[in-house]
């Protein structure tokens, strides 16, 4: 296993472990904080790896080893990832120490492993790269982005807590003010989607009817492809699963292994894609609280034309939490975070594949832990194994966005505009992140 794969597995395991704790003890909770943590980690690994090998193209850290080598690069990248993850997940220090010890042992055992002088250079570069990026993110606004004093309004169309979970709080209220990683502050506003449709707009009426029928909790079935699609892409901060950026990173690794990318290519792909997802979260949450548009569970129950006060969604799955019920996420609908994160990530993947010398024909099936053993429903029912195949990356982007309608927690325009914004973000970050 190469260094980037090793530390990717560690970072994604921490995302899963973090979301398996009670919410009050999570250190990088939800999609926004976890996308930031992954961007910091992969950017630091990338810059340290390139510094050790004297490679051009960095995100922030510009220093290099006097005489570069792959052994120095691997040592530096692993050290940088370890230091960042230790800072981001301090409660997991014992786990991380064990992983780092294992990494160093495997590194030293390699035929071209670092000699003592190379190892020392790698450690120094890794520490410096991690410090550079962690310092750049200190005071970026993330610690102030989740205020508990936010209040909702009863104006029709405005977001309110899930009526089926009325004690629900508000997540990421000020995440839109967090300092971007690659985009500029004016870009955050420029990439903001246009207003959602008015409640009496004929197009809105059609979209409402679609969610009312296809996202209804009474149509949930493992024989229903809508249900399977919704569950496949979910990852709504559930126990033993984590958040959407974790799923998208697993898909990136699937492609990287299929196309036999080398260590340097994988390092670059993961850094750019995670920087894009971090900025996608900032754009999406800026827009969410700017328009503050309601979710289907509120919109259908309180519809001014044809209210259905008993309607309930299939819901974001509370996987691996027996006794809990599925829910509607605790932030406004428009645009979809899934759609924005996914489109940004997969746009980077598309751009990367387009310039790769190892482009291969498409023949990949994707797996989701939401539909693999031992994942269970909130009622304790084991989920059936299920995999999905896609004709191209465009099909993945579209299905990821549409999946939220089938859970009854998003409108079609949430996905459409999230995808449009995510593509812009992915293109911009791919072009600018490492220049």
Image (cartoon, rainbow, N blue to C red):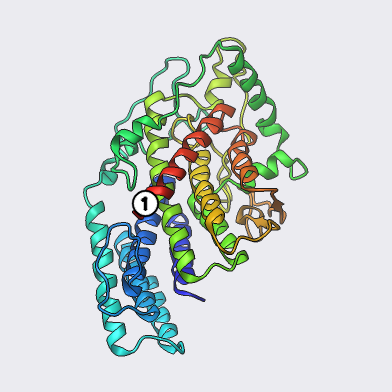
Tell me if residue 430 comes above or below residue 82 in the rendering.
Answer: above
Regarding residue 17, the answer to whether it shows in the image is: no
Q: Does dot 1 land on a helix, a strand or a loop? A: loop
Residue 89 figure quarter:
bottom left
Horizontal side of 132 relative to 251 (left or right) equals left
* Closer-to-camera residue (158/187): 187
Regarding residue 183, the answer to whether it shows in the image is: yes
Which quarter of the image is occupied by the C terminus?
bottom left
Image coords of residue 377 (percent x, y):
63, 49
* Closer-to-camera residue (28/428): 428
**Mark 1 — residue?**
433
Tell me if residue 210 comes above or below residue 404 in the rendering.
Answer: above
Residue 38 figure quarter:
bottom left
Image coords of residue 307 (percent x, y):
60, 15
Total marks drawn? 1
Horizontal side of 4 relative to 55 (left or right) equals right
Image coords of residue 7 (percent x, y):
43, 68
Q: Rate crowding at label 1 as few (under 14), some (14 to 19) or many (20 or more) other CA atoms within 10 Å.
A: many
Residue 285 figure quarter:
top left
Tell me if residue 266 comes above or below residue 433 in the rendering.
Answer: below
* Closer-to-camera residue (116/94): 116
Tell me if residue 182 comes above or below residue 124 in the rendering.
Answer: above
Horizontal side of 283 relative to 399 (left or right) equals left
At horizontal 28% and vertical 43% (from top left) the residue drawn is 179
At horizontal 57% and vertical 45% (from top left) the residue drawn is 234
At horizontal 27% and vertical 62% (from top left) the residue drawn is 61
Image coords of residue 119 (percent x, y):
31, 83
At horizontal 32% and vertical 44% (from top left) the residue drawn is 180
């Amino acid at each position: 296993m190469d260094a980037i794969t090793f530390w990717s597995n560690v970072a994604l395991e921490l995302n899963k472990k973090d979301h398996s704790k009670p919410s009050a003890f999570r250190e990088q909770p939800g999609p926004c904080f976890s996308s930031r943590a992954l961007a910091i980690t992969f950017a630091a690994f990338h810059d340290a790896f390139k510094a050790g090998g004297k490679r051009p193209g960095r995100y922030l850290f510009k220093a290099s080893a006097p005489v570069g080598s792959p052994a120095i690069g691997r040592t530096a990248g692993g050290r940088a990832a370890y230091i960042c993850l230790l800072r981001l997940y301090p409660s997991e220090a014992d786990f991380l120490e064990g992983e780092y010890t294992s990494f160093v042992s495997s590194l030293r055992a390699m035929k071209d492993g670092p000699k003592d002088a190379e190892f020392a250079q790698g450690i120094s570069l890794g520490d410096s790269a991690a410090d550079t990026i962690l310092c750049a993110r200190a005071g970026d606004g993330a610690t102030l982005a989740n205020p508990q004093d936010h209040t909702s309004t009863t104006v029709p169309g405005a977001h309110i807590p899930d009526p089926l979970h009325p004690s629900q709080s508000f997540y990421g209220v000020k995440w839109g003010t967090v300092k971007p990683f690659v985009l500029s502050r004016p870009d955050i506003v420029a990439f903001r989607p246009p207003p959602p449709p008015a409640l009496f707009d004929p197009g809105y009426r059609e979209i409402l009817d679609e969610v009312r029928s296809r996202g209804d909790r009474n149509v949930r079935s493992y024989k229903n492809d809508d249900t399977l699609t919704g569950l496949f892409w979910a990852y709504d901060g559930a126990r033993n699963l984590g958040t959407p950026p974790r799923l998208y990173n697993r898909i990136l690794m699937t492609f990287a292994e299929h196309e036999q990318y080398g260590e340097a290519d994988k390092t670059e792909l993961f850094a750019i894609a995670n920087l894009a997802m971090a900025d996608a979260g900032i754009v999406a949450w800026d827009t969410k609280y700017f328009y503050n548009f309601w979710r289907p569970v509120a919109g259908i129950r309180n519809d001014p034309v044809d209210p259905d006060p008993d309607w309930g969604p299939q819901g974001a799955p509370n996987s691996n939490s027996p006794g809990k019920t599925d829910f509607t996420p605790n932030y406004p609908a428009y645009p979809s975070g899934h759609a924005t994160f996914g489109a940004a990530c997969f746009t980077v993947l598309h751009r990367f594949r387009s310039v790769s010398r190892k482009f291969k024909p498409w023949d990949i099936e994707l797996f989701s832990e939401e539909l693999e053993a031992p994942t269970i429903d909130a009622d304790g029912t084991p989920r059936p194994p299920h995999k999905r195949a896609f004709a191209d990356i465009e099909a993945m982007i579209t299905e990821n966005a549409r999946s939220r309608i089938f859970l009854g927690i998003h409108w079609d325009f949430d996905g459409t505009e999230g995808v449009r914004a995510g593509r812009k973000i992915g293109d911009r970050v791919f072009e600018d992140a490492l220049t």
